[in-house]
Image (cartoon, rainbow, N blue to C red):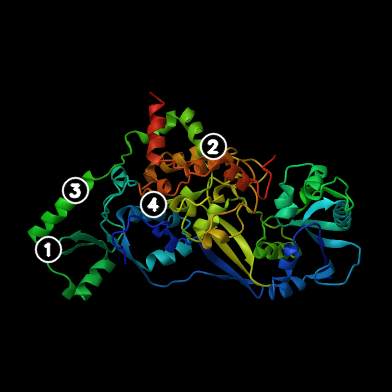
Amino acid sequence: MMGKLKLGVFELTDCGGCALNVLFLYERLFDVLEFYEVGEFHMASSLHENEHYDVSIVTGTVSTHRDLEVLREARNRSNYLIALGTCATHGSVQGSVEMPIREKLKAVYGDESNPMRAMDSKPVVEHVAVDLAIPGCPYNKEELYQALMDIAKGIDPVRPDYPVCVECKLNEYECVLIKKDLPCLGPITLGGCNAVCIRSGLGCIGCRGPLPGEVNPASEYEILRSKGYDDDYIVRKFKTFARWEP
Amino acid sequence: MAIDYNRTMLPPKKFFVRPRDKMLHLKNGKWENGVEEESLVLFGVHSCDIHGLKILDKVYLGEPVDPYYKARRESAFIVGISCTPDEYCFCRSLGTDFAMDGFDLFLHELPDGWLVRVGSVKGHELVWENEELFEEVTEEDIQHFRECEEKRAKSFKRKLSKEGLADMLDLAYGSPVWKKYADICLACGNCNMVCPTCRCYEVCDKWINAYEAVRERRYDSCFMESHGLVAGGHNFRPTRLDRFRHRYYCKSYFDPSAGFNCVGCGRCDEFCPAGIEHVKVLDEVRGSLQ
């Protein structure tokens, strides 16, 4: 086999969990390292090669000018770019705050000065083209593992195209929306998480973002209304991780 | 053990075509077959689900035979059990409320025991080997059985008008009722996942370590946008309306020789988050023609 693929992991503004979660592949990380060598991974290595990457992973939102520079460098130096985690794919919590940055600074700090050169938080996918987007807060490690292995072997990774409900039923979990009237966003949220929250008896909070295509939030809204949840609660629930804008 | 259950979430199909099913194992650069044969007893299967399996038999045991399904089907012993319909059941309208075959033994509850019908050679063998468990059926038993069945027949709350259903659907393709329901349908696929006659599956390869993989199939749903997508980018059912309508045509219109691909088990209604009712949709579609 040819030499190993060069892997870069870049972090923008986020909680750090997405990069850490790569290390949490534990022994399976060694399977990945059969095919990859790390060129840049702030959390795992002091290497900072600043060269060409076969595959790069970017986590976090673009929230500062520094983030934007890092992202552009990563994109320009990489053949294959993966936006990893809901911050990178949908903007997550910081991206869902609907206010211009100057107003946010004023609301929090009392004045509009911007020493950190903060920008309106936007997902990676709104700034550059990506080859693969894996959402989730946190994302499913298995999905990243399969994607990295596929890419190493020249296979285009399979993108889930189904809502959380599908995996919920495959696992035979009790439907918390129908049977317990919990506010579950499973029917309108992209699957791939293996319905992990429903396994614990919790409703889906929509962390993987809206199901692409003809998703039906209006019907989900009506269902939650009929179960007694108020408008404000439902709208905030919908917008926790994604803005639901086209 | 709850022998008076209404319905399980997934039908007994799951024992023959598993929700996630390993087909092949890639090991040392070779694919190994994943068919396993282990004997299995399914106890307490309702009549509608036995009919569901008979419909799947036509699909999976017809040429080309599905080896995974066949191996499990042949090693299974099926014991049916009588049941009481609840608010979702409409099997009587489809004639699936009573099974004449498709089981090894079928138990009907009597006030003082069970009336047992034998449905296969395997069933006969089991009864012969355990003769001490069985008594001859008396006139009184038959009387009780009849009364019970008559009472049950009257207790169905939902009825599907089966009369000319396929012809009706032939005329109703453009009915506005499809749009009305497609607007509230979440396209979440729950109805497909729980259906005893849905047979579509998706096949994916998964790495289990750096050099080994499994080829796995899982239930697929015709509500997914990619279900009707073919090479070249054409999609036979690009909109939710197309996909919503398609399910009804699959259940009640396509291939009339195969009978109806619906056994009236009521699962799709019970597990629909939007509360869409199969019978009501078809009744409204019929009504929209008049």
Tell me the distance, in whole angstroms, between the alpha carbons under discs 1 and 4: 31 Å
Between B29 and B248, the one lying in front of the other is B248
Q: Position of residue A215 (x, y in %)?
A: 60, 42
The residue wearing badge 4 is: B55
**Of discs 1 and 4, which sits in the foreground?**
1
Amino acid type, callout 3:
Lys
The residue wearing badge 3 is: B151
- In the picture, residue A100 is in which quadrant? top right
| Left or right of residue B68, residue B93 in this image | left
Tell me the distance, in whole angstroms, between the alpha carbons under discs 2 and 4: 24 Å
Amino acid type, callout 1:
Val
Chain bearing tag 4 is B
Tell how many labels: 4
The residue wearing badge 2 is: B242
The residue wearing badge 1 is: B137
Q: What secondary structure is found at the residue carrying circle 4?
A: helix
Chain bearing tag 1 is B
| Left or right of residue B56, residue B105 in this image | left
Q: Residues within 10 Å of mark 1 (few under 14, many from 20)?
A: few
Residue found farthest to the front: A110
Chain bearing tag 3 is B
| Left or right of residue B215, residue A18 in this image | right
Taking the image as drawn, is residue B255 in sight?
yes
Tell me the distance, in whole angstroms, between the alpha carbons under discs 2 and 1: 53 Å
* Quadrant assignment for the N terminus of chain B: bottom left
